[in-house]
Amino acid sequence: MSTAVEASLARFLDSPGVTGVALVDAVTGLTYGVAGDTAEAGDGQESSEFAALVAERLGRAGAEGELESVVTTSVRRHQVLLAVGRPAGDPLLLTAGLDRDRANLALAARSMGDLAGEVLA
Amino acid sequence: MKASVARNLPALLLELREEGFSGTVRVSGTPGGTIHLRDGLVGAAETPGAPTATSTLLTSGRIGDEAWLAACAAQPDPDLLGEHLVADGLVGGAELEVICTAAVFDAAFAMSLGAPGGWELSDREPALRARPGVEPRRLTDETTRRISLLSRLWGPPGELARVRPVPGTGVVEGPLSGRHEDILNQVNGRRTARDIAFALGRGLYAVMLDLVRMETLGLLRWETPTVPDGRPSTAPRVPPGRTTAAGPPPVPSRTEPLPRRKPRGGEKGG
């Protein structure tokens, strides 16, 4: 039985090259739902810790404002962490794995950013 | 429903999952709580140790009090209230699921911090819950992970739940996040992590993680208890500015005997 979160995440798989996507609690690392390949979406705990570390280091370096995204690129994949806007409550993260051969990172990032605003609807 | 021989609560929940049990598990102990199951999946859990989904929605201001009361009047059945909230546009379907799921995991964590008690099974009771619910195995694994992580970062989570942090004296490097600022506004040496979680409408575990991180950053510190047995202080309170004129309060001499009450020799009144 698909949950409301999984149904919402399934839309991200329409973007070219997106192989797996998850909605993760940025504080606790709890994964609320996954669509596509779970391993490609990444581990929620590790993703939340990594995003928190990046945000903290950027803050120390003088960056202002909340972290929006982190993109890590390897030979075959992009791993994208995207902050999800929320009316109230602890911050959330979208974590997505992208196939480099099939994904245009700029287009995928834009598409994910647009969808991220509706993921909690 | 057959009699359970489970040795503990996680084993009971796994057993009830296999049976496809729909009903309520009342857990005694401190803090104890109530677990709502549907087809063996955990849809909701309520405990005095952590905010519920309802508390989170209302305290965070996600749904206003008036809108909430109107929704409850229109749909009095808590089992169907979630659908009504989504249909009325008060909260998104996925967002409500996130809130309800987070509350289940947080309640399980809070219940694991106390002394284990017994349990009893009863019929299903309506509740605002995650759909379809959380697998008991996943709930147990996540609770174990949380306990393990906090133990590694700080120490026994049960003790962390009881400490009352005070603002730190460290200098903040970089901007303070809104989340940490909200916690600092609550920290006053009297509130525990649970108190702060309820005040902010956030999860207990999330608040405890933030407290540990903030202590590392010097934003707060753990107040050393001045009374080892936890007894509240009964020392006389002296308003500021009044100590110089009157001087310090007299200190009774230990050698001086206490005044004794003189009996009246059987004298009867009236």
Image (spheres, coloured by chain):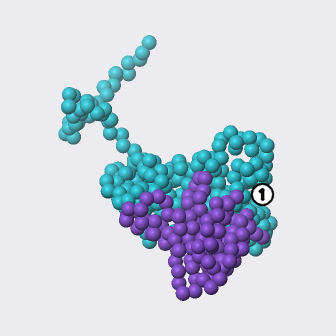
- Residue plotted at (37% across, 55% down): B220
- Residue plotted at (29% across, 30% down): B260
Q: Is residue B84 left or right of residue B196?
A: right
Q: Nearer the viewer, residue B162 or A71?
A: A71
Please rate how many residues cluster around mark 1, counting C-alpha atoms within 10 Å: few if below 14, some from 14 to 19, many from 20: some
- Residue plotted at (30% across, 25% down): B262
Q: Is residue B87 left or right of residue A53?
A: right
Task: Give the color of chain A as drawn.
Answer: purple
- Residue plotted at (52% across, 71% down): A70
Q: Which residue is mark 1?
A: B124
Residue most extreme to the bottom: A75
Q: Nearer the viewer, residue B242 or A81?
A: A81
Q: Is residue B270 visible?
A: yes
Residue A59 screen position, x and y as percent: 41, 63
Q: Nearer the viewer, residue B164 or B88?
A: B88
Residue B136 screen position, x and y as percent: 67, 70
Q: Amino acid at mark 1?
A: Arg
Q: Quadrant of the N terminus of chain B?
A: bottom right
Task: Give the color of chain B as drawn.
Answer: cyan
- Mark 1 belongs to which subunit? B
State the image quarter where residue B112 is shown: bottom right
Q: Is residue A92 above or below residue B68?
A: below
SS class, disc 1: loop
Residue B39 screen position, x and y as percent: 78, 67
Q: Quadrant of the C terminus of chain B?
A: top left
